[in-house]
Image: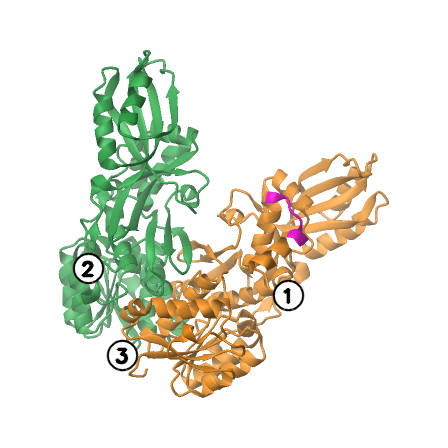
Chain colours: A green, B orange
């Protein structure tokens, strides 16, 4: 570490970048006391014009690569996002012998194996607490606090935007499109919200959690992925009437010598803790053989909360100058792939919503199909047709079945003449906490 | 660190000690991968006879001081409890240049300033994650994950035994004495459960959390302290009927340039997260200016969960050989005392239960006393006398008032001829999460 304290080069001055600048400026005395050295920004890389007064004595460059090359930078903070320039930037910083802190979940999920290996070889740290669950220290908890645990499951609400949308739809009966527009206006969702609503963002985060939990190499394509776009207020109402809340969950679970990884909207019994984590809050549940079950709840988005995690990584680097161990818990070379449970084999309970003409016999036909496939019905709800409709809504909760069985079931049910082709099929997770 | 990996000397082989032995034995390969070196027990100190087969090649001594003197020990794990021998043992280990891990909250709360200073001077680490909230990594979260946050409040359920007792009383209507006996039989409560039920154990933990949160020297006497011994099933029922649960909380909160610290049974609105943390679970809520509000929930007691925290400390020592920063966030010399809010000045809402003869005018007299002291009534409940009683129960919830005002109020109310001398007075915390 340099005599002049830890010198930070910050690339990207969006919401999180500006919040990071503010913390490092306002809390400089506290951080110096906690790190036994100062932590200060010496260089800012920003592709757009930035107001100089925010950066005190820092050098400012339009080319972020200049920050990675600056000998007066000990740690590069990558907050520009994306997986192209960001990747090159981090590689260059590592080549130059600099530690790296990033909040970039897509980059870590897709290129983390490569980047972390480069960091290991260069003897520098690569840290990314802010990449998962915003201000919640879930990476530190898995990597350090649970170091002595065999982890069997990680599950949680890990996309704040998606949870905000579902919460608004649930509590106010608003439509998906309406809430999404508000989320964008509030700055929770990106101008292109695709990754937030189609499950990609949650999948990236789950991949990182699963790697830490189970010692797997990062594999961005591993999770089975379903987003929240097709959720209707009607489904949320039916779920509520049966005592459930719908949350978008990421779940990584050991199944014998295989691992299942999936992100999807999920019905959760309303009395469970995860069912009551609302708005932009995130929550992560971790099961370990020694500790049992931990649940961490906190802000999953927002500039200050995310910057809190960025600064915690900087503080860790400042405190543990000699290194604080492998980024993913064990060195990259010791990560071991495990077979994934194929999407069609993943089992759970299910929620099914169908529309059918209100004639005698349809319920019998539907339940017969389920019985033929050995799928037990947990509960069943039939609603009278609404004024403007000629069909009834039929809602079923099933006991445990695999996705492939349910696909076959739904094919046969929707082939019935009384049943419409459109249906909703969602997983149900009761958890056992 | 020695070539032969991290060599652990374990003193105390009760529930937590045996669970620690089991983890270090069963997870040795995983820990070696995560720490880049082996972590193994080379010496066990146990004042009573212990079965040899559990400790493989470890040396066994009846005098725990032999462990502290053993040159083949790098870290001493103190699990003997108490504040006399344990203190001498840790001082000796530090003198001998050994790191120390302990789960001893009483020792850290009472002698932590001295012991941590000795460790700093000797250049060794003193760690105590297991001392607070069992398996929940709350010390790591405050010390590391929130390093860049100005913390304004820490509050939580930090005594598993007390929470088990209150939960059983609430959900099953059992008496305090009955549940306490079961807690002892289950091994949750000590043979002498005084510290668990009179608030001392929670106060010790709160003192440690407050020190980490606010940079205060440890002061075991700082918290205002009330236990759970006087809680009756009747109070729990009244609280429930008004939409509240009773939990034993520790609260440390900044109030301007002063700090309030208190442990006491507390009414919490039933929809709040802390109200729904039951059994031996612990939960800690932390508010920081950057991250907002974090809530950590997990097992607050139990051998394996506590041993998980002990082993995490060992893993941290193994991973960060060169030191991982000050035990309390900043060096002992930089801790700064702050004035405490005196007990009588601590404000909150209140729950009051009175017994009064059922005659006209009593309610008017009681409410007049409250009005005279400017205490507003939030809600009021009067129950008809039970068959075997000649008095009615009157339950009041007040708006915010200080303890001194409520003391004066209760003196005047119980001086009324229609009101009995016995009453219950509990604090109410709505939190704002």
**Magenta range:** B172-178
Q: Which of marks 3 and 1 is in front?
A: 1
Q: In this view, does A189 lie above or below B336?
A: above
Is A185 a magenta residue? Answer: no
Q: Do labels 3 and 1 share a chain?
A: no
User: Could you tell whether B431 is left or right of A79 in the image?
Assistant: right
Callout 3 environment at 10 Å: few (<14), some (14 to 19), or many (20+)?
Answer: few
Residue B129 in percent (x, y) is at: 45, 68
Q: Which chain's residue wears label 3?
A: A
Callout 2 environment at 10 Å: few (<14), some (14 to 19), or many (20+)?
Answer: many
Quadrant in the picture for residue B250: bottom right
Quadrant in the picture for residue B55: bottom left
Instruction: Name the residue that disc number 1 marks.
Output: B192
Whole-angstrom CA distance, mark 2 to mark 1, is 52 Å
Instruction: Name the residue that disc number 3 marks.
Output: A2
Of the pair A56 and B322, the residue shown nearer to us: B322
Q: Do labels 2 and 3 share a chain?
A: yes
Q: Which of marks 2 and 3 is in front?
A: 2
Q: What element carries label 3?
A: loop
**Residue drawn at (36%, 70%) of the image:** B25
Callout 1 environment at 10 Å: few (<14), some (14 to 19), or many (20+)?
Answer: few
Residue B19 in percent (x, y) is at: 44, 66
Instruction: Name the residue that disc number 2 marks.
Output: A112
Q: Which chain's residue wears label 1?
A: B
Q: Nearer the viewer, mark 2 or mark 1?
A: 1
Q: Is mark 1 on a helix, strand or loop?
A: loop
Is B177 a magenta residue? Answer: yes
């Amino acid at each position: 570490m340099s005599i002049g304290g830890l010198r930070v080069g910050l690339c990207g001055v969006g919401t999180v970048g500006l919040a990071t600048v503010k913390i490092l400026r306002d809390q400089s005395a506290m951080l110096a006391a906690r790190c036994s050295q100062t932590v200060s920004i010496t260089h800012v890389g920003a592709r757009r014009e930035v107001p100089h007064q925010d950066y005190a004595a820092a050098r400012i460059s339009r080319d972020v690569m200049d920050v990675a090359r600056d000998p007066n930078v000990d740690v590069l903070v990558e907050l520009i996002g994306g997986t192209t320039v960001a990747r090159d930037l981090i590689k260059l910083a590592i080549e130059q012998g600099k530690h790296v802190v990033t909040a970039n979940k897509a980059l870590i999920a897709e290129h983390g194996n490569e980047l972390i290996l480069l960091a290991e070889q260069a003897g520098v740290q690569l840290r990314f607490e802010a990449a998962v669950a915003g201000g919640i220290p879930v990476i530190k908890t898995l990597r350090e606090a649970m170091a002595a645990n065999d982890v069997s499951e990680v599950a949680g609400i890990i996309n704040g935007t998606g949870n905000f949308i579902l919460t608004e739809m649930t509590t106010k009966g608003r439509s998906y499109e309406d809430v999404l527009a508000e989320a964008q206006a509030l700055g929770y969702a990106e101008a292109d919200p695709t990754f937030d609503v189609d499950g990609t963002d949650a999948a990236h985060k789950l991949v990182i959690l699963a790697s830490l939990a189970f010692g797997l190499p990062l594999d961005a394509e591993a999770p089975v992925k379903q987003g929240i776009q097709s959720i209707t207020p009607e489904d949320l109402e039916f779920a509520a009437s049966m005592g459930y809340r719908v949350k978008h969950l990421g779940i990584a679970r050991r199944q014998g010598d295989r691992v299942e990884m999936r992100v999807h909207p999920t019905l959760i019994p309303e009395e469970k803790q995860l069912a009551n984590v609302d708005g932009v809050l995130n929550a992560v549940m971790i099961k370990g053989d020694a500790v049992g079950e931990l649940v961490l709840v906190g802000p999953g988005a927002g500039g200050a909360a995310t910057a809190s995690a960025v600064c915690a990584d900087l503080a860790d680097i400042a405190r543990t100058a000699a290194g604080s161990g492998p980024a993913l818990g064990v060195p990259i070379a010791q990560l071991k792939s495990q077979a994934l449970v194929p999407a069609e084999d993943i089992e759970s309970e299910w929620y099914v919503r169908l529309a059918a003409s209100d004639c005698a016999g349809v319920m019998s036909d539907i339940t017969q199909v389920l019985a033929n496939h050995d799928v037990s019905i947990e509960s069943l709800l039939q609603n009278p047709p609404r004024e403007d409709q000629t069909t009834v809504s039929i809602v079923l909760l099933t006991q445990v079945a695999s996705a492939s069985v349910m696909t076959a079931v739904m094919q046969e049910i929707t082939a019935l003449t009384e049943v419409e082709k459109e249906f909703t099929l969602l997983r149900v997770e009761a958890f056992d906490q």
